[in-house]
Amino acid sequence: MRTSIVGAVIALLLTISLISSLVVSQGLTPKLGGTLVVIQVGDPKSFNPDAQVDDMGFPIFQNLFNKLVTLDIDYNIIPDLAYKWDVSSDGLTYTFYLYKNATWHDGVPVTAWDVKWTFETINKSKGIAYSWIKASNIKSIDVIDNYTVKFILKQPFAAFLSFLGWYGTFVMPKHMYSNYSDWLDPKNPALQKPVGSGPFKFVEWVKGDHVTLEANPNYFKGQPYLDKLVFKIIPDANTALSSFLAGEGDVLAVRPPFSEIPKLNSTSGVIVKSRAVPSQWYIGFNLLRYPFNDRTLRLAIAYAINRSYVIEKAMSGYGFPARGGYTSAIKWAFNSNAALPNYNVTLANKLLDDAGYKLGPDGIRQTPNGTKLSIKYTYFTTGPETEAIGVVLKEQLKKIGIEVTLEGLEIGAWEQKVVKNRDFDIALCDGFQGPDPDNMRSRFALGAYLNFANYSNVEYYDLLQNASVTTDFSTRQKLYWKAQEIFVHDLAYIPLVDLVAFYIWKTEFHGLPWESAGKVNYNSYALTWWEKGKSIEPEYIVFLKNNALAIVIVLVIIIGVVVAYKVTKKKWSGKTTS
Amino acid sequence: MKSKLKSDNNFFYKYLLLWNRFKNYKGGLIGFYLFLVVIFIALFVPFLPLCDPYSIKFQSFLPPSFSHPFGTDEMGRDIFSRVLWGSRTSLSVGFGAALVSSIVGVLFGSLAGYVGGKLDELLSRIIDIFLMIPAFFLILLIVAIYGSSIYYVMLVIGLTTWPSTARIVRAQILSLKEREFIYAQKVIGSSTFRILFAHLIPNSIQPIFANSILQVASAILLEAGLSFLGLGDPNVVSWGKMIYSGTSYIFTSWWIAFFPGIAIVVTVASLNLIGDALVTILSPKTEERGAYA
């Protein structure tokens, strides 16, 4: 009787511990080994990462090379080759301190001389980053010692760091290139078999098929978990999707048709995540034209637009409603308090009534000047969504008595008519708004080429101008936040939709770039690991670690039971003997 | 004899004769009745109890049902109502373009044919040049750059398809101007203008009529083609545009592209049947010729 009770208790405890150990052993300890296959659209153009715009090569370069600083998935500036940097108070001197253990894949150390050579060559050979980093604004690049380099600028340029961390600024091996006068000289072996400093080393490139990289065991930030990284090239979206589903890839970097997203989402073993990218659809008003120079009218229109409805109807639901005066994807610069007016037709109608826009007999309002409030929406015909947005706006503005006609133009004609001739009422536009909020200045502020609305608020301009030369991070952030408040008050432009990017991968991989904000750049697989890989520590230690809690509980219980048994046995035996 | 002459000059009598012969062509007759239906729809669609073809208030991608006989499209618009309203766009583009093309073609052709000599050479070369230009690409280019209002599309199609009309008119006039009644007009001192507009053009109008009917059909197809490439007028309902937006969803929601496709087929086929019958009747090669040709 006694033994059966004890046995039952022990069995129960064991099952509990077994279940708990199963739950805990799913824990997130990285494992070693495995190959990650990324399916992407096309081949790289060359293996010189700084010479030309190369959107297909870029994700590969991000794993092969390093920059001085880099950008994570939220567009924060994070250390890369430089573990630390100082900016002088006048914003003219940038000093970078490099990791001392960084080496090129052939074993040569990465030094400040490589950095100096890279940026001087970008300037000399007009690399892609030439205008972004304002290479001609760099007065000198001084090597203080092998691991310290100083950039001296002619004019302060606060977005300098962001652009250094973005595109075409990979530090390149001077020793591989300095013997050739042209950095695209085909005789240079580094263009066939690139020598980088990044977490992965180049293995092979089979044109039109794949690029293979392998782990760099000497990576200065520690060896990556994966053994191999393969970029598989499949240009067609549908083929890419079926290869991915057939198990030939682990990350799908070719965007599948929107209509396939729900299917992918419900496939087991596949994760689909969407996040906003720093690119927006927005409309701008022609402020040179009556009545669009009336803020009340613009405010009423902003109230009348239901941005979620635009996404639902015009973009099959894929997008995020714009929330404020800048893209929410660049988190540090986005001011969530500077909110756009929320959909409210009643308020919009009231605003127009009060401002003297009277309803005509045909249900369409008239301006206080007596002209009919019929406006033209001018868009470029790059895809079905530009027109669809117009169809939704037409329907929504009808509810506040504004008639909209649509005018679709080829994009060159659109630029001529809208941007150059300013011959429009409202126009739709989109574009990349990063990597730094300085983009607002070149897009929306006084004097900017793309500022087709002719938005000329001097305060807005001054704030952005100020921010572009302020190097103190929090002061700069405050300037941008204030600028966004003015932007959403003036409403020369109304942001509509934050565009969305999809991240599609197999659940058996963890630590992907978009899950590693603050640690790696937005394409780096340095921290990615495979859950079926080998454990880093011997198996039994991992088992003990993962099941520590369960083991302790079991031990405590067993000891407790044994002690209790001993105690009771003594009592019992005492009883029998007495 | 006298009454014969009188009836010969009667415009309506000529067309009655034409109709009597047309009746014998089964295909032409079917086309004619189909086309009457299309015209009826185009004329009376505003009075039919239909949903607003522009309203996006319905749920998207509804399959055909009792409340939406042709289903709804990707933005939640009623396709049945859009197909019926689309007949107005297609027919007005078709007739508008054919009208423009006929007017320009008749003017050029009759001048070239009647005046002859150097002017004929010059005008004929201009006609040749226009015949060689691939009209569709010219139209595509013009519409892409200057915008795509429906009147614009009409005008552009008309102004690029006139040479075929011009050639027919020129040939007609070349033969007619040698006939006795034209000499008679010259002898009694009629002005060139009068000879052209009162005698030559009215007498050469029948082959142009057949040609114009075929041009209506090709203009409808051109407009649909433009819209299919995303270059149609976004402010009107167009069958071509409906097919264009439907192609992305052809495997999931076939009805978006299917019904406007059928509408185009019916309209263009009916016009082609009529046109073919007319061409056969009015062709000089046909045994029994028309009252005047």
Image (tube, rainbow, N blue to C red):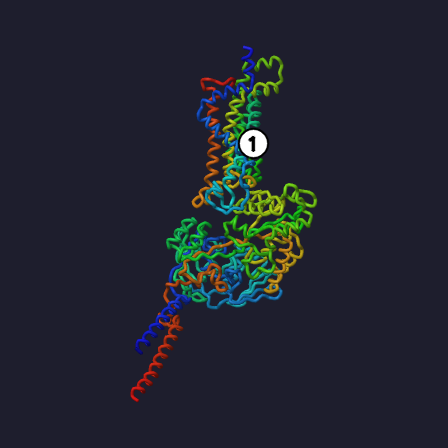
Q: Quadrant of the N terminus of chain A?
A: bottom left
Q: Amino acid at mark 1?
A: Gly
Q: Is residue B184 above or below residue A3?
A: above
Q: Residue furthest top?
A: B1
In the picture, the quarter occupied by the C terminus of chain A is bottom left
Instruction: Compare residues B291 and B19 and report the one nearer the observer.
Output: B19
Q: Residues within 10 Å of mark 1 (few under 14, many from 20)?
A: many
Q: Nearer the viewer, residue A402 or B280?
A: A402
Position in image of residue B229 (x %, y %)? 50, 40
**Count of residue discs:** 1
Q: Chain of mark 1?
A: B
Rendered view: A32 above or below A373: below
User: Residue A154, can we see it?
Assistant: no
Task: Examine the image and state in which quarter residue B104 appears.
Answer: top right
Residue B279: where, in percent of width, then height?
47, 24
**Which residue is situated farthest in the bottom direction here?**
A578
Residue B11 location (% of width, % of height): 56, 19
Helix, strand or loop for disc 1? helix
Decide if residue B74 is in sight here.
yes
**Residue B72: x and y, percent?**
49, 44
- In front of the other: A308 or A136: A308
Residue nearest the viewer, comparing B76 with B189: B76
Outermost residue, right direction? A369
Residue topped by disc 1: B96
**Quarter assignment of residue A63:** bottom left
